[in-house]
Amino acid sequence: MSNSNPIASSQWQFWIDRGGTFTDIVAQRPDGSKVIHKLLSENADRYPDAPLQGIRELMGIPSDAPLPADQIAVIKMGTTVATNALLERRGDRMVLITTQGFRDGLRIGYQNRPDIFARQIVLPEMLYDSVIEVPERMSATGEVLKPVTPDEIAALEIQLQEALQNGIQSCAIVFLHGDRYPDHEKQIAALAKHVGFSQVSVSHQVSPLIKWVSRGDTTVVDAYLSPILRRYVDRIEAAFQGDRRPQLLFMQSNGGLIPADYFQGKDSILSGPAGGMVGAVQTSQAAGFNQIITFDMGGTSTDVAHFDGSQGKTYERVLETEVAGVRLRSPMMAIHTVAAGGGSILHFDGSRYQVGPASAGAHPGPACYRREGPLTVTDCNVMVGKIQPTFFPQVFGPEGNESIDRTCVLQQFETLAQTIGQATGQVRTPEQVAEGFLSIAIDNMANAIKKISVQRGYDIGDYALCCFGAAGGQHACRLAEVLGMKTIVIHPYAGVLSAYGMGLADRRILRERSVEIELTEAAMPSIQQGLATLIQECESELDRQGKQDITSIDRLNHLHLRYTGTDSTLMVDFASLPSMQKQFEDRYQNRFGIKLIDQKIMVSMINVELVGKTMTLTAMPTLVQPINNRSVEHPTVPHATVSFFSENQWHNAKVYSRQALQVTEMIVGPAIILETTGTNIIEPGWCAVVESGGVLVLTHQPQAQAVATIQPIASGITPPDPVRLEIFKNLFQSIAEQMGFTLQNTSSSVNIKERLDFSCAIFDAHGALVANAPHIPVHLGSMGESVSALIASQSASHSEPFQPGDVFISNNPYNGGTHLPDITAITPVFDTATQPLFFVASRGHHADIGGITPGSMPPHSQNLSEEGILFDNVQL
C-alpha cells in the first residue's frame, strides 16, 4: 500500500532514476540541502535493489535494518524494470482473450516486416502464452451481432480455470469494437476476476481508441508488465518499518507522476527518459529558454526531444510507437533514441568509418577502462585529449585504484590508422582517425535531432540545446555547430538531470476518446460535452489516488484533427472553431509543406490532461552554488593547461572547476570545465558564461570560423575520404527517410499509410542511385532504370528537358517499372543551375489502375493493356 503522508520539509525526499547501468539519486535532506549519489543498478554481490541501497547509504542505515518511514516524506522514481522485462521477454505469463476468428490478428498485425532487407525473416516473439476465443460480436454501430450466452460463459470459465492451473494469472481482454461498446469486455473481465486472475487488463480501459491491432497490443503489454511492477512496488514497500509508508510516486511515460498503486505496465516504458525531459524543460525555462532541443547522451545511447514552450505549449507526445517489436498506443513523451553513446564501438569496414550500433557496455567497457574492451567513442575523446586521465576518477584496474589507460588507447589507434592507410592510401595520424570517428558519431546524433525537429517542420536555429547525461558535455559544441544552433544550456544537475526531473515533475492524469466527427459549429456542443465528461473522469481519478501533495490543478483540453481521407492527426488546443481550424492548417503546413484546400477536417480524438502541481523550481535550491566572494575582475585561476585536438589541429586549453566559477564570468574556448558528474568541452569559437543558479550557458561566436575537420585530399586520389563517405551516406539516407515519412503521413491510401507499400530514393544527375530509405527492395532495384529512361526520353525531345517544378509519373515495366499498380513520381532538383543536380523519386502501390479485374493484377491477362493504364513519363 502507498500511504498518503503530506510532504514535510523536516523529512528526507528522494528523486531516483533507476537506469539500465546506473541508478542516479538526488536527495533533499531534512535541512533542505541536497546531495547526489550514483551506484550500479545491478550489483547482486552487494545489494538486491539499487534505489533502496542508495537510500540506505545516504541515510546511514545498515543493510539489515528496516528503513524508517517516518523520516522520509516522498520517493519519486523512474525505473527501467518494466522496459527491461519487455526487451528481455521476462514479463508474466498471460493469456489473450479475444473475439472468435481473431486468434492470429496480433501476429498478422499490419503485415510490415521488422527488417525489410532480411533474407531470413525473424518475427518478434508474441507476449501471450495462449489465446482463448470468445464467440461474441458487436457491430461498428453497437449492435449485438452475437451475444455471449450462458453456455459460452460456462465453457469460458472452464478454459480460464485451466489457464490458472497452468500457472497463468494475467489476462488481456480485447474484443472487436470494444473501445466504443465495452459491454462484452466488462462481462468477461468480471468472470476472469471471479475465477481468480490477479491481473485483468481490458482494452476499453487500457487504450479506448480505434484500431484493433494497436489497442490489442497495448492491452497485452499492460497485462504482461503490470504484475512485474506490482512485485517491484511490494519489494520497495516491504523495506520500511511497520505499517506506515512514505509517499511513493512513479514517473509515467507521459511525463507525469502517479502513486505506485496505480502505476501500469503500458505507462512505464519511458519512465526514466521522461524524467530527463521534464528536468530539461523545467530547468531551461527557469533559465529563460522556452525553445529547446534536449540532448541526453549516456554510455549506450542518446535520447533527443523537441520542446516549444514559446506559446505555453505542453510536452510533445506520441500516441503510437513500437518498442521491442510491440506496438503501443498510449500517450508518451516524443523522445527519439539513437544508438550513439560513449560506449559505441568503432569499426572500419575497409572503405568507411562506422560508429555503433553495438556498445561495449559497462563490461568490458571502452578500451581505456583496462578490461581489454574495444575502441569506442569514449576512447576517441581520450585520444584527442578531451578526456584527461589526470582528472578522471581512479576506479579502474584490478584494485579499482587506477586511472584510465591512455597508452592502450594510443596503441590501438596507431594500429587502426595503419590499417586505414593501407586500405585507402591516405595517411592519417591517430588523433585524426579519432576525430573522424567523433565526426560520424556527432552526425548520427544530429540526424536523430533532425527527425524530431526539421522533419516535423521546426526551424531550430534559434533554439537552445539543453545538454545532459554523462557524455553530453563532451560533444555539445560540435553537435550544435552541425545543427546551426548558437546556444547550449548545461544545468548544474546535468549529470543526474533525469533524477532531478523526478523531483520537478507534476502529477498528471490523461484521458482520451475516439470520436470521428467533422469539425463544424454543429459538432461543438458534442465536443464540449465529451471534454466535460473526460474532465470529470480525470477529477474522479485524482480524488481516488489522493491529492494531498497537490498545490493547484490545471486542466488542458485538446483535439486531434486530420483531413478527411488521411490518417495523420495533429493536436490543437480546444478553442473557437476558426482558431482550431487555423491551428491545424498552420501545423499541417509546417509539418508536411502543403495545405489541402477545401478538404474537410475531422476530429479523430479528444483528450484531457489534468496537471496537479506539486513543487515549484524556485523551492528547489541548486546543487552547485557559485562562489560569490570574489570579484569577476579577478578571474578564476585554471587548474591546469592541457592540449586537445579539434578542427584538425591541437589547441592549448585551460582546465577549470565549474564549482569555482563566478556568476557572469566568461570562459573562452578552447577550454575544459570539469564537474562532479561530467566534463564540458568548450570548443574554439565558443564561450561559456555562468548564469544565476549555476547554469552554464555556451554561445557560439560567429566571427570564429571552424577549420575543416578533415584534411583536404589531393586531386587524383581515387579512394574517397572514409569519414565524408559515411557522413554523406547518412545525410542522403536521412533525406530519403524524410521523403518516406511525408509520403506516409500525407497519404489517404491504406496501401501507403499502413501496409507501407512504397519506396523513396535519391538519384544523381544521370539516374544512378545515391541513397534510398529502407523501403521495398523490388521497388528500389529497378527505380533507377525509370529515372534513366526519363532523362533519355526528355533529353532526346527537348533542348531544355527539365524545369524547376516538373514532376513526371511512370509505371512502364519496359522502363524500370514493376507491375502497373506501382506508379513512380520523379522530380528533378535544381539550385541556381539550368540542369538538375539530382532527382528524387517515390514509388507507391495503387489499389486499382484499371484492367480486366479489380486490383489490376489479373492472373489470366495476355497483354499489358489488360492489366491497366500505362503511364510512360507523363508530366503532371
Image: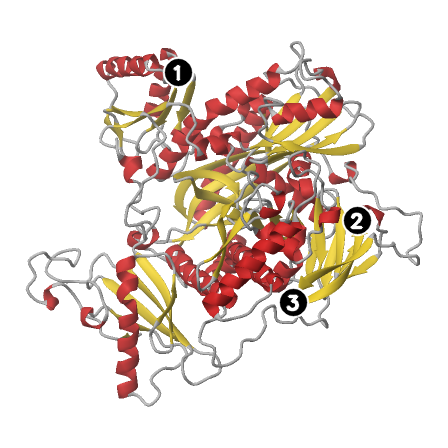
Q: Residues within 10 Å of mark 2 (few under 14, many from 20)?
A: many
Residue type for callout 1: Phe
The quarter of the picture where residue 820 lies is bottom left
The quarter of the picture where residue 775 lies is bottom left
Residue type for callout 3: Glu
Residues 772 and 145: in front is: 772
Count of labels in the image: 3
Secondary structure found at label 3: loop
Residue type for callout 2: Arg
Q: Disc 3 designates what residue?
A: 647
Residue shown at the point (61%, 59%) measured from the top left: 479
Q: Is residue 88 above or below residue 295?
A: above
Q: Earlier in the sequence, mark 2 or mark 1?
A: 1
Secondary structure found at label 2: helix
Secondary structure found at label 1: loop
Q: Is residue 378 above or below residue 168?
A: below
Q: Is residue 510 above or below residue 70?
A: below
Task: Kindly report which numbered mark, 2 or 1, lies closer to the viewer in this rendering.
Answer: 2
User: Which percent across, then down, holds residue 624?
Assistant: 80, 42
Numbered circle sitting on residue 658: 2
Residue shown at the point (35%, 87%) measured from the top left: 800
